[in-house]
Image (cartoon, rainbow, N blue to C red):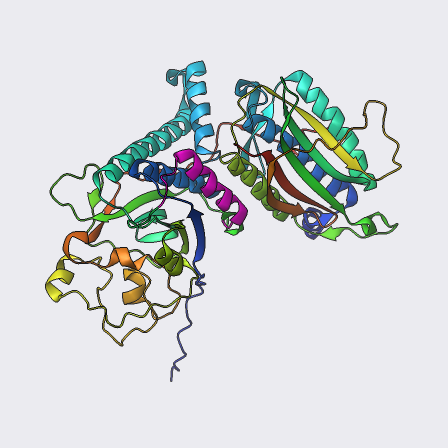
Amino acid sequence: MAGKLAQKSAITLRGSTDIVAEFFSYGINSILYQRGIYPPETFSRCQKYGLTLLVTTDDTLKKYLAEVLAQIKEWLYSMTVQKLVVVIKSVDTAEVLERWQFDIECDKSAKDPGAKPREKSEADINKEISAVIRQITATVTFLPLLETACVFDLLVYTDKDLDVPDSWGESGPQFISNSEEVRLRSFTTTIHKVDAMVCYKKDD
Amino acid sequence: MAGLCPRKKSANKKHDPISCDIEFDGVFAPGVCAKLVAELIKHVLYQRQQFPMSYEQVKQHFHRQQEKEGPSKQRGLGAVHHNKVRQGIETAEEMFNNLEKIFSQMSHIPQVVLVLGATPVSPKETYTFNLPAENSTGDTLSLKTGVRTMFRRLVQKDFMSDLKLMSPTSAFVLIKAPRKLDGTVEWFQPKLNFKLSTRGRQVVINLVSASCAIEEELSRGSETSFDLSGIAPLDSSSTEQLNTSAYENFSPGQNDSGFGGENRFSKSSESDMTPMLTDRMEGGGDDDFIWYQAPLAIKGFKDKSSKIAKNSEMLI
């Protein structure tokens, strides 16, 4: 019993990587649903973090996200990733309308040989993640309406001199001109800390 | 011989009220005010785990499901859950429609309260929405501007995420409005004996018109005390009728802890006063206010129809 409890509270680098990658998966799905990037009928409900979340049923999108997140997981494990950004832009004009940025801080001492697992319960982490996702949902109430069809890009900021896989290309930051920014909550596994923020084009 | 030991105080921890000011650069028409209050209620219902998704998402999914499956196909637990969702939405819609009506009927509504708990007098959490003062001046703002300003501030402040998780319960809505017992107020029931409880968590959201300097002063800080010297209490004939009057049980000199609302004033010996917009609550004459309660409570529910995701199900 004590052993089982210890497992639920002990966070390893691998465990933290899984948690953060999974959060990104649900977080990206939530953003795509909330902002109407894909039709709502292409999403199905599931329960995670004590919430009802919407996840895509579109096979192409699922495959794309799975591939991207598999790579992000590797970078999370090697602690070479700094940010993940979901960029939303107009199909017609390619103008960037929104930027959801997730800053990642890694405690590199967790990579040391013989590093001990950290003490933090899965329940506490899930509670923090739940708060971030509820805040993302609430944020949508004041964001400007996306009146044109939009697409999304995923940008990942990594350490310099990292070998970039062939399927990834270098990109500019895709900032928004004339924007407003709102800092959102963060969560931490004690090994990875994720801060969220949204930047959006001011509604004239 | 049996000894006496001092009675241990209850372990209930008294929390300081949480206060959030939201400032607007203008004023709102009554209809817009009603909609802002409705949006606040929807926000609280979702953030406090009374609805498993945001209100609009719950509605959207419910209607889509009905179109797809039809109500007749629901059986057993599925039917029970379906009915809970339907009831939650229908009650909320009726609430919001009647909020608009009462706002259009009343000259001024200074306060709306949302109580989460088994009954309005035994709340787990109480959300007091103090609305812009009647004498506020400025440009008339649209609903869009109001909603954006309000939610931007609420999201930035985000105090609800720090509150303890809550199981589904009932949500009661009460409105403080001018006394009209002639039957012109529909749906909402006058509650002359109602007093805001000090139990449970208290959250105060002040919607303030930036042009009103008095409102800014009164709404700042949860420990502000107010000097009542020079303000004459109502006479006893008035206090018999107005049981919810701010001056009930007041004796000058007896309670120096400040003015924050009738319940604190008469019952609490502690000085943690929730700031209220006292200029509106002073009774007498044409401006006396009473509480009206919505006859239905919005009942929270959990999502029982979607699958529980396994760990790492989303990843390769």
Residue A68: quadrant of the picture: top right
Residue A184: quadrant of the picture: top right
Front-most of residues B244 and B74? B244
In the drawing, does residue B137 fall left or right of residue A186? left
In the drawing, does residue B54 fall left or right of residue B90? right
- Residue A204, x across and y down, in percent: 52, 32
Q: Residue at x 22, y 73 (%)?
A: B251
- Residue B94, x across and y down, in percent: 29, 32
Q: Is residue A170 magenta?
A: no
Number of dots carrying numbers: 0
Q: Is residue B165 above or below residue B102?
A: below
Q: What segment is highlighted magenta in the picture?
A: B138-159
In the drawing, does residue B231 fall left or right of residue B126? left
Residue B107: quadrant of the picture: top left
Q: Residue furthest bottom?
A: B1
Front-most of residues A146 and A168? A146
- Residue B4, x across and y down, in percent: 38, 81
Q: Is residue B154 above or below residue B269?
A: above
Q: Is residue B145 magenta?
A: yes
Residue B50 in view (yes/no): no
Q: Is residue B179 above or below residue A137?
A: below
- Residue B213, x across and y down, in percent: 37, 57
Residue B242 in view (yes/no): yes
Q: Residue at x 43, y 42 (%)?
A: B44
